[in-house]
Image (cartoon, helix red, strand yellow):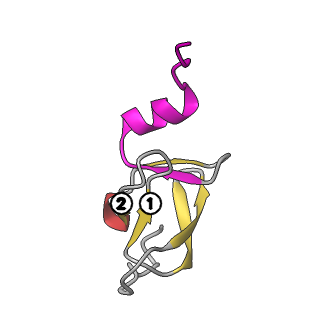
Amino acid sequence: MNRFERIPLAAGEAQLRYLDGDYRIVRPGSFVRCAVTSEPIPLDELKYWSVELQEAYASPEAVLARLHPKPRKR
């Protein structure tokens, strides 16, 4: 998001296009969901996302869980 875009006032889940160091709002909303934990992330608190996977993450731990999953025990 850049300084010329308004923070959307619409309640509900937003749809974003994740870019390098920025994102574009495709559908207005007040939050996105973490791809790992499914917890809502307010847009003003969104710090972690993947441009390649087009996913948002709630924390650095969620990023690590997505990119480096632990092997399953048999």
Q: Which residues are magenta?
A: 55-74
Q: Position of residue 26 (x, y in %)?
A: 59, 76
* Three-letter code for the amino acid on which mark 1 is drawn: Arg
Q: Residues within 10 Å of mark 2 (few under 14, many from 20)?
A: some
Callout 1: few (<14), some (14-19), or many (20+) C-alpha neighbours within 10 Å?
many
Mark 1, secondary structure of its residue: strand
Circles 2 and 1 in contact, beta carbons < 8 Å: yes
State the residue in front, 42 or 72: 72
Q: Which mark is residue 59?
A: none
Residue 37: percent from left, percent from top: 41, 47
How far, Cα to Cα, is label 2 from label 1? 6 Å
The three-letter amino acid code for the residue at tag 2 is Ile
- Mark 2 sits on what residue? 41
Residue in the image at 56% along x and 52% along y: 55
**Is residue 11 shown left or right of residue 21?**
left
* Residue sitting at x 36%, y 83%: 11
Is 46 drawn above or below residue 16 in the view shown?
A: above
Residue toward you, 5 or 9: 9
Taking the view exactly as shown, the residue that stands out farthest to the front is 74
Q: Secondary structure at mark 2?
A: strand
Picture layout, residue 67 above or below residue 44: above
Residue 67 is one of the magenta-drawn residues = yes
Dot 2 or dot 1: first in sequence order is 1
Instruction: State the image coordinates of residue 64 (x, y, percent, origin top left).
Output: 47, 30
The residue pinned by badge 1 equals: 33
Q: Residue at x 56, y 67 (%)?
A: 16
Looking at the image, residue 41 lies above or below residue 10:
above
In front of the other: 52 or 5: 52
Residue located 47% across and 31% down the image: 65
Outermost residue on the top side: it is 74
